[in-house]
Image (tube, rainbow, N blue to C red):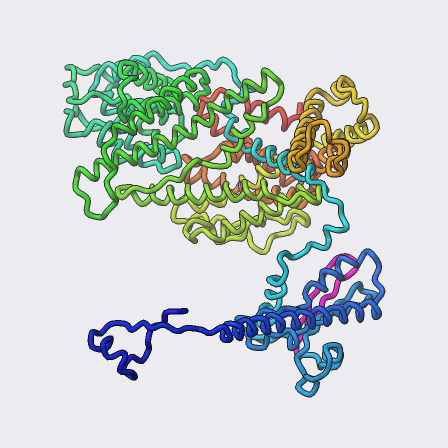
Amino acid sequence: MTLTTCDFPSLSPLFDRCVKFNVDCVYTILTSPSDEEYLKQIKYLEAIGQLEEQLDAMQQEMDILQLDNTNSQLSLDTTSSSLLLLSSIVTSTASNPFSSTTTVATDTRMVKRQRTAQGLVATVARYLPNPASEATSPRQQTHDRPPEKYQWDMKISKNGTMVIQTNIKSHTELLDCLCNGIRTIQQPEFVPRFWDNYRPKNPILSHVMQIYVWKRYGRSRLKGMYLSCSPKHSHQHTSPDVSPDDTHRIADVFANPSSLASLTSQIFDAYADCINLDLLNIHVPTFRRFFVTPAHERKKKGPLSTSAFTMLSSPPSSPPDPPLKPVSSALLALCAIACTTTCKHFYQAVPPHQREHLGKLFADKARALVADMFDEPTLETLATFVLLAYYKHRRSQGPDFEFLVSMAERLSPLVKEQLPAKPPVCDDQPPWATEAQGEWTLYERLDFQLSKISTIVSLHCVRRKMLRKGYADQSDRSIVNKFHDHHYPLSPAHDDSEAVRRHILYHGYLRQLNKDCHEAAHHAPADNTGEYVGIVGHMIEMSMRRWYASIPNSFKLDLPLFEYYGPDLLTSSASQQPTSRWLQLFEDAPDAIPLLSTLNIYNEYMLMAIAHISRTPADLETCEAIATYWKEHYLHVDYDFLTRQWGDKWCQRVKKMEKMLQGKIEMMQSHCLLAHDLGDDTNSSNPELANLPISTAALVTLLTSAYSGFNDPSARIAVYSALNAVQILQFLRLRHLCLFDLRVANNVWTILLRALKFGFGNKDMRTLLQANLICCLSMVRDEIHWLPNRPSMVDFVKDMEQEYKEEFGIA
């Protein structure tokens, strides 16, 4: 019984009432038992027809397989290729949504293979139905149909080169082929990977290889950011001498509130004019409105000319009037950070030789002011702690840095509760909504900066634990992952300047680049462990190319990546695209963002290469020697002998690899026991547990496969990246000095020095590498000259000079 809406109510007088009241008419239809039986028979006949079509398709495939077996006798080494070609035979019963000729009997493809002197030749031919032979059997249809007008010919040469030729001349023909191929993939539940049947898989080794190489990649990024806080370079630093006259004038400035307000205001204005990623720590309009003393609230004695201390060159005749508003502790902390940079915008405000001393005074005064209101959950208190912590980090002062971070972390949720309700974003906002939105923007950016420096605090703790124990716990390894992400993206505010908006967008693009490279390194397939490092390098390179192609044109240079435009590295001949075009593109860039995006591409690739390429050729020999020793003595390994023969560092590496492999084996054993509902004492009779690989061969594979030399293609691209990065860094020092990055220069130095140690290239190319090493060392020296308050970097330059002398035999 069904209820059916009447379509024609006016045809019967029974439906006049429905028509009169203008309502839908619903009437009842009763089906007899004979009708129901007839409907079931129709469904059964349709099912039988589908089964017959499937049987015909299976018969066709069997005929094709028998024909191929009689015509060609292939050896075992070509079996996987043959099966792979056979997978393109189309036998589908589903209808093609793009074509009307889609039945099994009218769509069949055959694969013909033969061996020639050039290699294996395979022809994929598609056949159309013959109307005169439609009544014949499926076997006759397969052999009597004429070939279609387009074919696919694939030739595989002995060296592995594949050439595919086809006479398809229109998109319609190509689309028809692709649609039939899609049906082939959609028919089974999964597409089998025939080549996996001929190579044993090792899931334990694959997983450990992913973890091991991925952790080294993350650790290389960690060291790039951790360089300034490394205990290797920590020592007691002596501040540069300040003349007694300068000391007296600085004391007068801090004793005079009006002069201090003028100096801090000028430093803040210079800091706001310098657009870089450090500026994104605050929201400039809100910070200026809340913490910078407005000009109309203080009485000036005169404008500052060339220096903030010009007005104090002689003692004032009368004491200045005090400002109406005291200097904020957050502004003092920001001025302390400004004194740790090499920004040229501060040359007029603060002389370079006085920056360290003045920055220390700013930090001490901010610390004294915030000491009385450390328990007040306000934006000023939070900003002071966050900015002071960042200043201590730049000064490599670990204990104070950790204390300030902990105070800021306690205050952050309390400050968030005190903020006003977040208004919706719209074009026409009232003044109160604009101020509330500004407070939220300032808080979010301070919290963003706090999350970054909190990560550094966690790394400090892990570093100390590693130095104390000699290894890192499993739970501490997750902290390394934080260097692959910036927690959450920044968002521009409605009152941000256009330059700040572009930097925020660039920050989002850069975050996506780090995420893509991280995922490529972590999810790389590890079946072929002998080429795993090459696979990782290739996947990261492709991720970078896709990222660079996806960003807007105003954020990148119109040059292909990973190509050097100086003299050719192998022939030393002039390139088709001279270096002058590089310089012209640099000059035509709207700002420094296209240079920074290209430089970050090269820096990310160098980080990957540093993680995977050995430091010296001796390291590769050591890996092979340890692998040989492990094969011979894996049952009785003498770790004391390993330490004496190859050093404690390699002994710890071997122990770490063995621990990782053993932990993975134990985890898989426990999973197998749970899957079979077995106890802990019944693992010997389980065949899956018996087939688990031992760590001997796996550890040897890790030693021999996880390290590579400069014969790898990724090493050549890394050298190109380093040479191009030198040109960009030189231009940044000429036009955008504030954006010079010491970490990139450090990575360039590492890549070029390792290339020389491995004897990469011919004599002319090694001369080119040496010249770029000298240029890189000169830039770092000049940067450290203007940044004397980074004691770790001073020792780092000495280490670079010593490495250069040892490499070239200079006494």
Residue depicted at x 26% and y 33%: 439
Q: Main secondary structure of the magenta part?
A: strand
Q: How many marks?
A: 0
Say left or right for 439 vs 795: left
Say left or right for 725 vs 734: right
> 596 or 451: nearer the eye?
451
> 281 or 710: nearer the eye?
281
Residue 42 at what x, y percent from top left? 55, 74
Residue 312 at what x, y percent from top left? 24, 19
The magenta stretch spans which residues?
149-166
> 551 or 112: nearer the eye?
112
* Any part of residue 338 in sight: yes
Q: Is residue 159 magenta?
A: yes
User: In the image, is residue 634 above or below residue 609?
Assistant: above
Q: Quadrant location of the N terminus?
A: bottom left
Residue 161 at what x, y percent from top left? 73, 59
Residue depicted at x 83% and y 56%: 76
